[in-house]
Amino acid sequence: MQTKYPNGEAQTKSLKTRRKILKTARKLFRTRGFEKTTMRDIAHESGIALGAAYYYFNSKNDLVLEFYLKTQKDIESRSLAIFAETRDFRKRLKLLFDLQFQRLAPDRKFLHVLAREASSPKSPLSPFSGRTKSIRDVNLAVFKSLIRDCTPEISGELAEMLPSLLWLIQMALIFFWLHDSSRNQQRSRGLADSCTEIVVQAVRLYRLPLARHLFKSLNRMLGEVMSGL
Amino acid sequence: MQTKYPNGEAQTKSLKTRRKILKTARKLFRTRGFEKTTMRDIAHESGIALGAAYYYFNSKNDLVLEFYLKTQKDIESRSLAIFAETRDFRKRLKLLFDLQFQRLAPDRKFLHVLAREASSPKSPLSPFSGRTKSIRDVNLAVFKSLIRDCTPEISGELAEMLPSLLWLIQMALIFFWLHDSSRNQQRSRGLADSCTEIVVQAVRLYRLPLARHLFKSLNRMLGEVMSGL
DNA sequence: GTCTATAACCGGATAGAC
DNA sequence: GTCTATCCGGTTATAGAC
């Protein structure tokens, strides 16, 4: 991961091997599934020794993390195009959730190890850990630009808290989607719809004096969740 | 697990061994942690062979599940006492969350395997799977009796949807608490407070015509999440 | 049918030679 | 940076004892 490359020569070769491993792993994970694919399989099909595979990746799980990171970066760049299409808050949100499902779909079968790994506090893959902080920050930035210049206009305190809230909702949606065995993950899409609707309705209620207490508590909750990073 | 016992003799001995394993496992998990305790350790300290441990428990994870199930049953019976103390909705909710934290606390260090295991769709421990359905039903029943005869009065559609909502919140709280490294899990307690407050405020807003759409969407969302069990 | 004990198996991960 | 040989521990297979 953090290996130094003193010269272009080595870099090229090293990168080639690294990519080869990733490609093989992805292929095998997709066809046989994560648990039925052994590191020995991956090394063998990549034409290298087991030890070499571990030279490039610290663990089998790390391979999966790599795919996820790449996808999230991809989604970030594509989200800009989405926000250019429409300024409507609801549509933007819906399109973004759709984009997540769509881009993650090819790897859905084995991405569940992400959730599993994320549930281990010790793991660097924990949702509350440093390794994933960069990707979380990217996600938050996406939600910030979703809110910017949208209709209805969202500003002030609401604009402060919404990114965190939307990020949490997105994480929950992805978790649900990973386990969703309905055809084409229809249930997850329905869930994304209702979550979108809930947020839209909540935004509408925000200015209501009677709802003041509710949003105060919600804001406090978000602070408590996100402060630990 | 589902072994038949044709006579009391065998049952007694069998149960004794079983309990011995559980006791040893719990002790070792608590002192060394889950991953540093091997099944060989547990068998050895229990004075039995490795194979015997596997005769009683299908896997190392199953041992942890056993502790969790026992705790949840314990919580169920204690919750009745709590609801006898007060009819106040907010207080009942807060006391119930506190009870969860308190009873689960001794095993907090190794209960994270629950979350990990629960994240594997194939696993019988998945939150959406049959093995855990009974415990989920028990939890839901607890929330139903929390709502019954409380002040402010909760009935109708709201009484229908609240148990599911509270269950989801509870699961999220426990997940957060498992990873919470703040002293004495203070952050989790704060989070439980704000979640409680959010629910209380939401209940207040329920009758508001302007909030109709919001609750409709919320209800739909809960249906989508819970229908898959 | 109920239980125990021993010896593998399997696959993720590591050590260390080259 | 790549290999081979090993470790380690969850899990399984098997052979019997009661």
Image (cartoon, coloured by chain):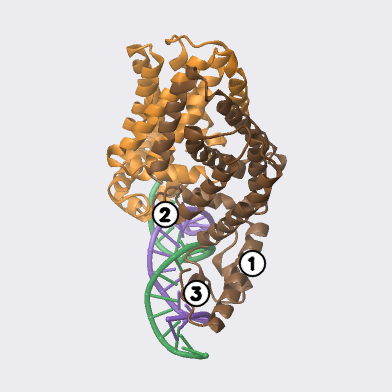
Chain colours: A orange, B brown, C purple, D green
To which residue does mark 1 refer? B23
Q: Amino acid at mark 2?
A: Gly
Expressed as whole percent of the image width and height from the top left, the position of residue B142 reads 57, 47
Task: Using the image, determine if residue A38 lies above or below residue A11.
Answer: below
- Do circles 1 and 3 both sit on a common chain? yes
To which residue does mark 2 refer? B130
The image quarter containing residue B195 is: top right
- Do circles 1 and 2 both sit on a common chain? yes
**Quick one: label 3 or label 2, which is nearer the N terminus?**
3
**Quick one: label 1 or label 3, which is nearer the N terminus?**
1
Task: Using the image, determine if residue B200 lies above or below residue B30.
Answer: above
- Do circles 3 and 2 both sit on a common chain? yes
The label shown at residue B72 is none
Subunit of label 3: B
The image quarter containing residue B16 is: bottom right
Question: What's the CA distance linking mark 3 and mark 2?
Answer: 27 Å
Subunit of label 2: B
| Residue drawn at the location 51% of the way across and 16% of the way down | A205
Front residue of A107 and B118:
B118
